[in-house]
Amino acid sequence: MKLWEKDFEINAEIERFTVGRDREMDLYLAPYDVLGSMAHITMLESIGLIGKDELPVLLTELKSIYEQCQRGEFVIEEGIEDVHSQVELMLTRKLGDMGKKIHSGRSRNDQVLVDLKLFTRHKLQEVAEAVKDLFDQLIRKSNQYKDVLMPGYTHLQVAMPSSFGLWLGAYAESLCDDMLFLQAAWRMTNRNPLGSAAGYGSSFPLNRQMTTDLLGFDSMDYNVVYAQMGRGKMERNVGFAIATIAGTMAKLAMDACLFNSQNFAFVKLPKECTTGSSIMPHKKNPDVFELIRSKSNKLQALPQQVTLMMNNLPVGYFRDLQIIKEVFLPAFDELLDCLRMTAYIVNRIEVNEHILDNPMYDPMFSVEEVNRLAANGMPFRDAYKKVGLDIEARRFIPDKHLHHTHEGSIGNLCNDRIEQLMAQTLAGFSFDRVAKAEQNLLG
């Protein structure tokens, strides 16, 4: 069944090529296609295109299909082109001509747009919650180990004193900035394209504000041409939000792999979270963090992939946009898997509290000594030269008692302010309003 089918059959190879992986990808969108249809037909009834007696029948059947989606029982049958065709087929099988009325005033173009936006905002909420969970684990560990010193590095050379509190808190604050990208992605996503039809509107007197309210969108995409131009743009910009979170995780994963190695031995991963070697019985490999690093680096390519697929397309719909679904839809589950696995291990990671017992790290206190001499009146350059010569002559004896008090330093992590940053950003999402709108629609 094809919604555009007339009196001829398309070549089988052409059909295979043009449908591609749509049936597989559209399973991600199925429950959201139903939600969009429920809002659309409710609006159609209000303008007289569906009878008052027909609406409750159609809504009941659509709710039944939605429940099938939630149970994982929804399938797109062989020979059915996409999720939109499957839902309409199921309605017409059950309700006859009544089921054929649901497409009035819309096109598959705006139908897939609203499906993608409903899917994406749902996944963005899941990602925001997973980011917050990882953030909480990092802050908790940062506070737990705030007084345990470790070497800080520049150029992979021992540089200055750091602490586990500082290291872990840095990644927590990085997630605060990442959440700003996620909020921007949410705001752009949470606008209603339904009613733009094929990109040029409809001669039916559609009430687009009604569907906007029913689906819990913040506003509509007002210009119908722009609504269609948003296909690909939304995915690209959401991709940037995904990429910035992935960038934070990739860096953390690299640190974890490095610091877990015997040469560093700063942290110890739980043995149940490592894998072994088929030949070396002593090995405990950080495979999880290696995979997180690789998957995160792959996710950082997502906005570029989407850009290359949509770049230089003129105004209007093109089938090129179909392929974006293949890289975009699965990206959320991969990101969520990495976030949850990272949070799981960070919660269980152990730190070495005796790193500085090794005299090889003594030189990292050189700046502390230079600053002490300068504070006592010696010109900074003279103090710098004296300490440098003492180190070369092996006369340098470090004072390992630090007195950092300024904001964000070892002695004043400002974790409470970092937590406030995260809370303020999370408050800018309209998760509760969206959930209430969907519940009302389904209820």
Image: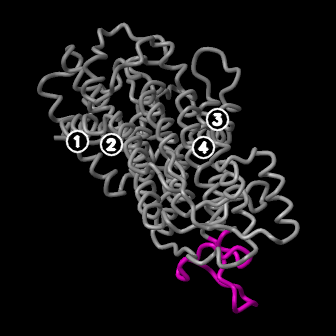
**In the image, what residue occupies the spot 65% across and 79% down?**
357
Q: Position of residue 249 (x, y in %)?
A: 58, 54
Q: CA distance from mark 3 to mark 4?
A: 12 Å
Depth check: 96 or 326 in front?
326
Lateral position of residue 89 relative to residue 14, left or right: left
Closer to viewer: mark 4 or mark 2: 4
Depth check: 30 or 248 in front?
248
* Numbered badge on residue 90: 2
Q: Identity of the amino acid at label 2?
A: Met
Q: Is residue 379 magenta?
A: no
**Residue bearing mark 4:** 243
**Residue bearing mark 1:** 61
* Numbered badge on residue 306: 3
Residues at circles 2 and 1 in contact by the CB criterion of under 8 Å: yes
* Type of secondary structure dominating the magenta stretch: loop
Helix, strand or loop status at disc 3: helix
Residue 76 visible: no
Q: Residue furthest front?
A: 377
The magenta stretch spans which residues? 259-287
Q: Identity of the amino acid at label 3?
A: Val
